[in-house]
Image (cartoon, rainbow, N blue to C red):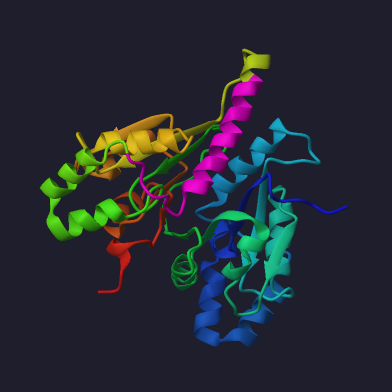
């Protein structure tokens, strides 16, 4: 029977985002592909350590307990530059860590993002910046996972996801005005167009998938008043009043929602992230992520004018 992905939230993830491949990458860079292959074969039963996106992925998959096991809400698929032989260590590590990931694409030395539409993916995460930039340039929703020193709290059942707005959930048309005409014209433009929804950004469909799961949690709480929702979404943006209104109305008119919103007007996002403590944060500006990444799992979305080659 055909396995249909169309109704699921499908996330593609490179092994470099799921696991800590620092030692493996060092072998590849310093000694070449043959030595890397030998290293992976020799260590095939050595479990890879958790990477930056591991806590996010583990919690996403845990939400499948809201559905029939044969019809999961969330599907995570490995998209890897490894070949099937060297990828064997990745799959064994997945099994040892208890992650319910059974599907994978291994393409020796080649970027795999072109398979995202065929697999109905609304997000691809990788620690390979070049792969992510290629995917975004092709109009696909991808993010570059940055290094972090955060240690995951395995006892925390909640999954907190934070999004920037412009260039992430929405397109970057407003950002273009800000870059070309300055803050005053940006605010005036947003006031004039407050009731006109923004064009969608690269992660709007991912947020839509998150909202579907939140609605399932609401159904569960109606059946069982003691159920505690585990999925919480925050908007964390440099916008402030009056430009905040168009962001709120755009999300509403798209039929989406967030639990929390922070309209910071230039306040350092890192300080807010420290208090919010999300398991993953998506932003299109490296200048913001340089502050958040040391303590918060952070993902750069290299989309729009702010990320155009200089």
Query: Toward the viewer: 150 or 219?
Result: 219
Count of numbered badges drawn on the protein: 0
Question: In the figure, is residue 122 to the left or right of 88?
Answer: left
Query: Could you tell whether 281 is left or right of 112 in the image?
Result: left
One can see residue 159 in this view: yes
Residue appearing at x 59%, y 70% in the figure: 114
Q: Residue at x 58, y 21 (%)?
A: 228
Q: Is residue 128 above or below residue 66?
A: below
Main SS of residues in magenta: helix
Is 233 drawn above or below residue 48 in the view shown? above
Q: Residue 35: horizontal and vertical position, in percent?
A: 62, 84
* Nearer to me, 199 or 49: 199
* Vertical relation: 179 (above or below) 109: above
Left or right, residue 283 beside residue 242: right
Q: Position of residue 26 (x, y in %)?
A: 51, 76
Considering the image in quadrants, where does the C terminus appear? bottom left
**Residue 45 x/y as whole percent:** 73, 64
Q: Looking at the picture, how far across and down is residue 302, in whole percent? A: 38, 62
Magenta stretch, residue numbers: 196-220
Residue 218 within the magenta-colored segment of the rendering: yes
Q: Is residue 263 visible?
A: no
Residue 297: within the magenta? no
């Amino acid at each position: 029977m055909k396995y249909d992905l169309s109704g699921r939230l499908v996330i593609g993830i490179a092994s470099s985002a799921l696991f800590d491949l620092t030692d493996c990458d060092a072998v590849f860079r310093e000694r070449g592909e043959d030595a890397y292959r030998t290293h992976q074969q020799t260590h095939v039963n050595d479990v890879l350590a958790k990477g930056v996106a591991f806590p996010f992925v583990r919690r996403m998959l845990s939400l499948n307990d809201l559905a029939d096991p044969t019809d999961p809400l969330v599907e995570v698929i490995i998209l890897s530059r490894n070949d099937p032989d060297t990828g064997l260590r990745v799959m064994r590590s997945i099994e040892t860590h208890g992650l319910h990931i059974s599907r994978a694409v291994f393409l020796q030395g080649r970027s795999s993002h072109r398979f995202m539409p065929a697999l109905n993916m609304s997000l691809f995460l990788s620690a390979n910046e070049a792969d992510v930039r290629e995917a975004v340039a092709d109009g696909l929703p991808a993010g570059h996972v940055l290094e972090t020193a955060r240690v995951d709290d395995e006892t925390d059942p909640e999954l907190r996801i934070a999004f920037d707005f412009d260039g992430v959930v929405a397109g970057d048309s407003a950002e273009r005005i800000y870059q070309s005409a300055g803050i005053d014209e940006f605010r005036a433009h947003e006031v004039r167009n407050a009731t006109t929804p923004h064009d969608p950004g690269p992660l709007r469909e991912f947020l839509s998938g998150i909202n579907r799961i939140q609605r399932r949690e609401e159904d569960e709480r109606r059946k069982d008043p003691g159920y505690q929702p585990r999925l919480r979404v925050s908007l964390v943006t440099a916008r402030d009043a009056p430009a905040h209104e168009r962001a709120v109305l755009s999300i509403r008119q798209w039929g989406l929602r967030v639990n929390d919103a922070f309209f910071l007007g230039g306040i350092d996002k890192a300080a807010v992230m420290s208090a919010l403590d999300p398991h993953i944060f998506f932003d299109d500006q490296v200048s913001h992520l340089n502050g958040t990444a040391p303590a918060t799992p952070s993902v750069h979305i290299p989309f729009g004018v702010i990320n155009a080659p200089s």
